[in-house]
Image (cartoon, helix red, strand yellow):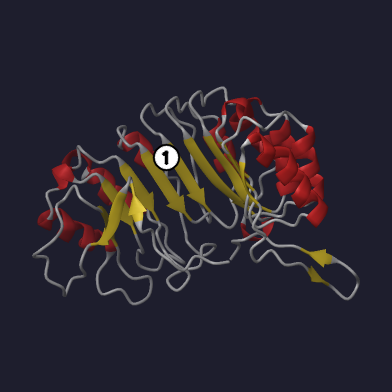
Amino acid sequence: MTIHDHLDAMYRLPAHTFPGPAAPTDGLPDADSVAWRITSDVYDADEDWEDAFARFCAAVDTTRVRALIVGAWQEAYDTDPSPVIAALLGARDRFPALRALFLGDMVMEECEISWINQTDVSGLLTGFPALEEFGVRGGSGLGFTALSHGALRRLVVETGGLPAAVVRGVGASDLPALEHLDLWLGTPDYGGDSEVGDLEGILSGARLPRLRHLALRNSEMQDAVAAAVAAAPVVARLEVLDLSMGVLTDEGAGALLGGQPLTHLKKLDLHHHYLSEPFVERVRRTLESAGVEVDLDRGDADEDTGDDGTVWRYVAVGE
């Protein structure tokens, strides 16, 4: 699976792309009615992202803007978004109502997720202390320094390979308002070098008192993640547990069902899995009878077998 569609909404607002340099800017939506997507082009850009942002700030009442989506920046496959971040931070006083920000809304045709260059993004959170939602796409060069943020309710990190330092940075952060955490752990082939021990700060839940939705997905080590989750203190307070998009087999599902009860959940998402049919039925029988919604759609999780009998299994989003 690859990412073919841009974000269509953020902060419960429909996404709207700010017009390019040759398009008129009259008749724009009300500043607070949409999530504004500001974008350049990865290849042969006619306008740098920072120039597009400057036009946006001149055309829209930024004091009313509630959500911003950063799309493509020039040569994102080779250039990190430091100038983009600098432009955002330089204009932060002009965005007193900003509550949601996403960095790197690029689809496959613009830049594969594993090609997107990133940098340490924690400065955006410290620079915008009122943010309630933050998301980022792309793991190459991504950093997340441990921080304290009292307003953030939703954090999403989408990668084909999430650096271990980012996992530890999130786990070491004090996020007392965070309700929704979604990490795409990925594979070592694309920089996903984390191990289960790196999740300790998250799974303990000590710094995440309000967490209700935990997604640790798109992982090559999904069985080990499931085994760790089975005994994790944070699970008791969750409403949604998402271990989807990864290489989850009977081993991981067995560990999950053999651990602490999950019958308090509203939903368990395991879509894109590698479970045998008996285990699929076992999961359904155990949890659906208790009223838990379970997503066991196998999707495109197909196995390949090499000439030597080696079985290859894949995460949903890698390259």
User: Mark 1: which amino acid?
Assistant: Ser
Q: Quadrant of residue 5?
A: bottom left
Which residue lies under the disc numbered 1?
122
Q: How many marks?
A: 1
Say what secondary structure mark 1 lies in.
helix
Task: Name the one closer to the observer, 46 or 62.
Answer: 62
Q: Residues within 10 Å of mark 1 (few under 14, many from 20)?
A: some
- Classify residue 254 as left or right of residue 2: right
Image coordinates for residue 224, horizontal then vertical, percent: 75, 43
Query: Which residue of the protein is positioned furthest toward the right in this rendering?
Result: 308
Indicate whether 140 appears above or below 300.
Answer: above
Q: Quadrant of the C terminus?
A: bottom right
Query: Which residue of the protein is positioned furthest toward the left in this rendering?
Result: 26
Q: Residue at x 35, y 36 (%)?
A: 132
Image coordinates for residue 72, horizontal then vertical, percent: 36, 64
Query: Which residue of the protein is positioned furthest toward the front in this rendering?
Result: 289
Q: Quadrant of the N terminus?
A: bottom right
Q: Residue at x 51, y 30 (%)?
A: 211
Q: Quadrant of residue 89?
A: top left
Image coordinates for residue 68, horizontal then vertical, percent: 29, 50
Image coordinates for residue 295, horizontal then vertical, percent: 62, 50
- Classify residue 174 as left or right of residue 171: left
Task: Name the one closer to the observer, 261 or 3.
Answer: 261
Task: Name the one closer to the observer, 182 or 21.
Answer: 182
Q: Residue at x 65, y 37 (%)?
A: 198
> Can residue 276 be seen in the rendering of this structure?
no
> Can residue 311 be seen in the rendering of this structure?
yes
